[in-house]
Amino acid sequence: MNDPPATGILLADKPRGITSHDVVARARRALGIRRVGHAGTLDPFATGLLIVLVGRATRLQRFFMALPKTYEVTAQLGATSSTGDPEGEIIATGVLPADPLVLPLGVIRQRPPAYSAVKVGGERAYARARRGETVELQEREVEIYGWEPLWREGDRVGLRIACSTGTYIRSLIADLGDAYCLELRRTAIGPFTTEDAWETQGPATLIDVLSACRRFVPSISLGEPEAEALRNGQAIASSTDMPLALATDAGGTPIALVERRDGGPVPMLRPIVPA
């Protein structure tokens, strides 16, 4: 009998100059598995944490994407970039933003940059922008949880920013005035960090998906009838308001990750990744 396909989480430290899709391709080759995706794009010029999802863990993409992010950014002051990063047309103005710098906190409305991966009419915005088309993207709500200055040397400054998913750091830096994002590194996604992350070359070791999810997903303990139903792949009546939970038996042994589904007479918990 063939072994079941591998399922798990791979924490990757993306180097500068490659795409997030390139990291996925490298993971496929390293693991010998085709069913691989990721949970949150990094621009080619950016480095840092990319959560790679393998096998049935790809079903959890939206839950990993919803986790908060932490970035460290080097901002170049006194210049602008057509793309908000070093890959665009740079114009040195010599006009420095006010000192001290001030970034917003809390919920804000932010317009994604034209050179972004947001789809417009089924096509990435950056593809239209590179053709010289005018790209108008809708504002959306994001949240800045906190930020702090790390250092300042002349017309460059280092910042640490914690924010919600969907936040464009390039836009935050451009909103300072004449400034753009010179370097960007994602250091954390929820409870996960770049510490001991795979460097996208050589052997790759998966983290068990249930162990990984235990770090940010609540657990619910079930009686034996409900536990047995989940083991058999059946949905059960929901006992939680959380969209995702780790179901265990009365002894604390994991059974499955379950997703809450509404829409029927009663909310249900459906197993999506069994133990």
Image: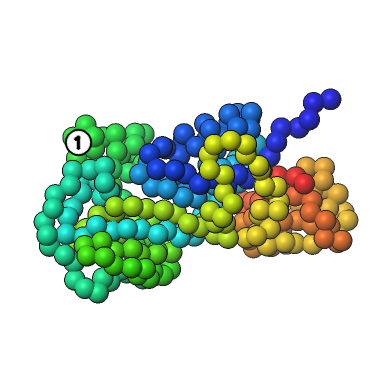
Number of on-image labels: 1
Q: Amino acid at mark 1?
A: Glu
Is residue 127 at all visible to an observer of this figure? yes
Q: Position of residue 149 (x, y in %)?
A: 35, 70
Q: Position of residue 1 (x, y in %)?
A: 84, 25
Of residues 176 and 197, which is closer to you in this image? Answer: 197
Instruction: Give the vertical position of 125 relative to 68 (above or below).
Output: above
Q: Position of residue 230 (x, y in %)?
A: 79, 48
The residue singled out by tag 1 in the image is 133
Relative placement, left or right, of 72 versus 252 is: left
- Residue at the image position 29 percent from the left and 64 percent from the top: 157
Is residue 136 at all visible to an observer of this figure? no
Instruction: Give the vertical position of 40 relative to 152 (above or below).
Output: above
Of residues 21 and 200, which is closer to you in this image? Answer: 200
Relative placement, left or right, of 81 versus 249 is: left
Q: Position of residue 24 (x, y in %)?
A: 52, 35
Q: Quadrant of residue 213?
A: bottom right
Of residues 235 and 227, which is closer to you in this image? Answer: 227
Give the SS element for disc 1.
loop
Which residue occupies the extreme bottom position in the image?
Answer: 100
- Residue at the image position 37 percent from the left and 68 percent from the top: 150
- Residue at the image position 67 percent from the left and 47 percent from the top: 207
Relative placement, left or right, of 48 versus 157 is: right
Crowd tier of the residue under label 1, counting other residues whose Cα lies within 10 Å: few below 14, some 14–19, many 20 or above = few
